[in-house]
Image (tube, grey):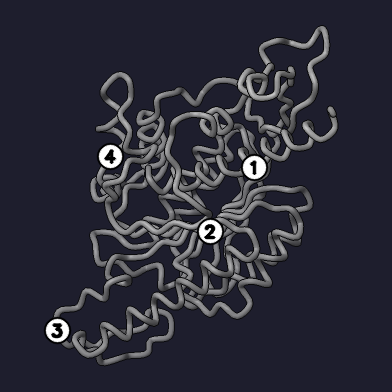
């Protein structure tokens, strides 16, 4: 049984639904905030992102985030192969009794074996927005630095799960493409691409999504990491294309706290980082209108994701990276639970 499947049956608390918004350090309990049995998990799991970003080495950052996340859980993730629940089947003499689902037996008075699908060759693509808008940051670091660290963390995490991980960086055009592999040294190649400086301007999320749909034949996982500050007219069509090809899609939206609240205390000239357009802003006069437009845009993106069956989570850059990683894990948990429920219904209907 994989760690994802074990955690879907554990007491780890996930966010409800397929969307989530977290602004800053949440006080709610989460997998990243739980204490380990040894008492040291809480310190590791609650690493301040400001301290983390001061570490120059991207691989070391990602390693610390993953280890802190693991340290905050009650169960070890490094046990067994990476597999996913598939379905139930009736028990037959000679079957390994360790596969029996005793909870299902208690409900149905029938013996069922849990079947699992080997997912060791699962292909995961990380689409990372490196446009100029991602270069904004009101903290000691930018959205781009946060997004790169999150992408590196996911790559490191998936590598531990023995999955094939690929990368595509983009701005107004596709920049680097790293095919999904799991061989030795592949993670280092991904991290090197993430560390490269960018020179693009605008944001086009539809191009990379369409390209991934074109080059990936097998069902897999696509994770889009972006501020999503771009027109939404073609977004539903692009995401629907991925979903129609049975890809699992997770959108991790990265925002700066100032973008959410327009934390400007006095009249200033703001410059659009992608177009260069200058706007005189009086915060008292424009804050309410800005927040209304910002919220409408956010709701549009969430509505599109919900319509096509993509999970979406929003994080501000002052939120610990372990919590953003837990969003990713939560999406897998719900997928595993959905598979187990459909398998149980199928078995129940055929065993009469």
Occupied quadrant, residue 118: top right
Work out whether residue 198 can be spotted: yes
| Residue 173, image quadrant | bottom right
Q: Earlier in the sequence, mark 2 or mark 3?
A: 2
SS of the residue under disc 2: strand
**Residue beneath the point at 44% across and 56% down:** 20
Which tag, 1 or 3, sits closer to the chain's start? 3
The mark found on residue 338 in the picture is: 1
Question: Quick check: marks 2 and 1 in contact, CB under 8 Å?
Answer: no
Residue 163: x and y, percent? 63, 37
Could you tell whether 192 is left or right of 258 in the image? right
Would residue 120 be seen by someone viewing this image from the given angle?
no
Q: Above or below — where is 48 with respect to 204?
A: above
Kindly identify which numbered label has been placed on residue 266.
3
C-alpha gap between disc 1 and disc 3? 50 Å
Q: Distance between the Cα atoms at labels 2 and 3?
A: 34 Å
Residue lying farthest top? 94
Mark 4 burial class by Cα count in 10 Å: few <14, some 14-19, many 20+: many
Q: According to the image, label 4 marks what residue?
A: 46
Percent from the top left, x then y, of residue 28? Answer: 31, 45
In the rendered structure, are the residues bearing label 1 and label 3 in contact, judged by CB atoms less than 8 Å apart?
no
Q: Is residue 123 left or right of residue 4?
A: right
């Amino acid at each position: 049984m994989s760690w994802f499947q074990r955690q879907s049956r554990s007491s780890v608390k996930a966010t409800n639904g397929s969307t989530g918004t977290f602004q800053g350090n949440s006080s709610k309990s989460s997998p990243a905030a739980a204490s380990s049995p040894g008492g040291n998990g809480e310190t590791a799991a609650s690493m301040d992102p400001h301290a983390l970003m001061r570490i120059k080495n991207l691989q070391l950052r990602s390693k610390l985030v993953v280890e802190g996340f693991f340290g905050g859980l009650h169960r070890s993730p490094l046990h067994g192969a990476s597999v996913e629940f598939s379905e139930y089947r009736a028990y037959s003499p000679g079957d390994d009794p360790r596969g029996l689902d005793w909870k299902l037996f208690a409900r149905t008075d029938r013996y069922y074996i849990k079947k699992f699908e080997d997912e060791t060759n699962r292909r995961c693509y990380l689409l990372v927005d490196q446009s100029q808008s991602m270069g904004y940051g009101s903290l000691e670091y930018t959205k781009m630095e946060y997004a790169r660290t999150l992408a590196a963390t996911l790559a490191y995490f998936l590598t531990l799960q023995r999955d094939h991980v690929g990368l595509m960086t983009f701005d107004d055009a596709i920049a680097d493409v790293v095919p999904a592999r799991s061989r030795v040294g592949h993670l280092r190649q991904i991290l090197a691409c993430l560390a490269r400086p960018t020179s693009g301007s605008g944001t086009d999320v539809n191009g990379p999504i369409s390209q991934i749909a074109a080059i990936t034949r097998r069902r897999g996982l696509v994770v889009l990491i972006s501020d999503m500050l771009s027109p939404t007219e073609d977004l539903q069509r692009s995401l629907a294309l991925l979903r129609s090809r049975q890809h699992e899609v997770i959108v991790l939206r990265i925002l700066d706290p100032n973008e959410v609240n327009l934390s400007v205390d006095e009249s200033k000239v703001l410059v659009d980082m992608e177009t260069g357009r200058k706007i005189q802003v009086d915060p008292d006069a424009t804050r309410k209108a800005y927040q209304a437009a910002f919220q409408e845009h956010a709701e549009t993106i969430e509505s599109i994701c919900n319509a096509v069956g993509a999970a979406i989570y929003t994080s501000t850059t002052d939120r610990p990276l372990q919590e953003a990683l837990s969003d990713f894990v939560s999406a897998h948990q719900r997928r595993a639970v959905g598979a187990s429920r459909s398998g149980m219904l199928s078995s129940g209907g055929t065993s009469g």
